[in-house]
Image (cartoon, helix red, strand yellow):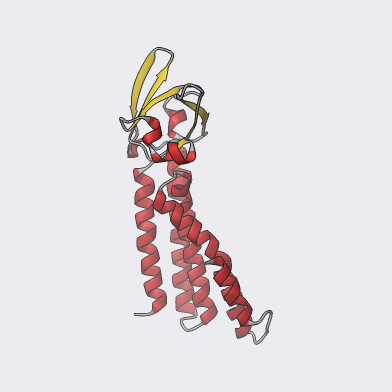
Amino acid sequence: MNRTVIAMIVALIAALYLTILNVRHPLIGMDVIENKNGDIIVNDIYEFGWAKKHGIHINDQVLKVDGKPPLSHFTVREYKTIEQAKTITIQRENQIQTLKVDYKSHGTEQWLYYIALPAGFFLFTISLSIFLLRLRPNDKSATVLICFLLLIGICYISASLSAKYAPFGRQMFNGIFLILPAVFLHFVYHYFEKEKKVWFAKKLSFPFMGLTF
């Protein structure tokens, strides 16, 4: 099987998995701080986040995340935000309520911006890649361009997960985002090589790729 076709299949599987993770975990959109008493207080609410849709306010106190003290949750401890949680217990004055976060918690904006648009863009890159593969099956520059397009599509989907502090999504986004310039430089080299023109020596691209990795 053609290596380009294998790359497309792998990219499609990765995009499907990332999309499933996106559906499973809505953006909670709630930054927190720890006050002098050691309490975890809501510090900021995102415009399209789950927290705003469910009436959480700035200065509300977070008592528990997934039934445990807030600081035991990794996004609170490491990033001062609440994401990747299933339940959140909030106290406002003397009122205490426990709210459930599940896949049904996506608002219309979240479905559009974090799921539909990234998935739609990836399908566009797949379609364009298939077109290029049929048009130029043995063209090196077309092959590298296909890889570049697939990486952009996956990067777009993983960016949503990165915003939600999903570990796998953040790793995918950071890794692909850093490697994209090197892949694009590789495409430019092969394109000019096909046109029998030299913009830069091939040996100059390898240190750049090494620096990227």
Q: Relative to 50, say whether 154 is above or below.
A: below
- Outermost residue on the top side: it is 94
Q: Which residue is drawn at the image coordinates 37% and 35% (left, top)? A: 72
Q: Which residue is drawn at the image coordinates 40% and 19% (left, top)? A: 91
Which image quadrant for residue 28? top left
Q: Count up the numbered dots.
A: 0
Residue 163: image location, x then y, percent: 48, 45
Q: Which residue is drawn at the image coordinates 36% and 45% (left, top)? A: 23
- Outermost residue on the left side: it is 67
Q: Relative to 198, say whether 49 is above or below.
A: above
Which image quadrant for residue 198? bottom right
Residue 147: image location, x then y, percent: 48, 70
Q: Which residue is drawn at the image coordinates 57% and 68% (left, top)? A: 211
Visible in this render: residue 73? yes
Which quadrant of the rendered structure holds the N terminus? Answer: bottom left
Residue 89: image location, x then y, percent: 36, 25
Visible in this render: residue 121? no
Which image quadrant for residue 75? top left
Quick one: 69 or 154, which is closer to the camera?
Answer: 69
Q: Relative to 6, say whether 62 is above or below.
A: above
Quick one: 168 or 183, which is closer to the camera?
Answer: 168
Residue 178: image location, x then y, percent: 54, 61
Taking the image as shown, residue 59 lies to the left or right of residue 1, namely right
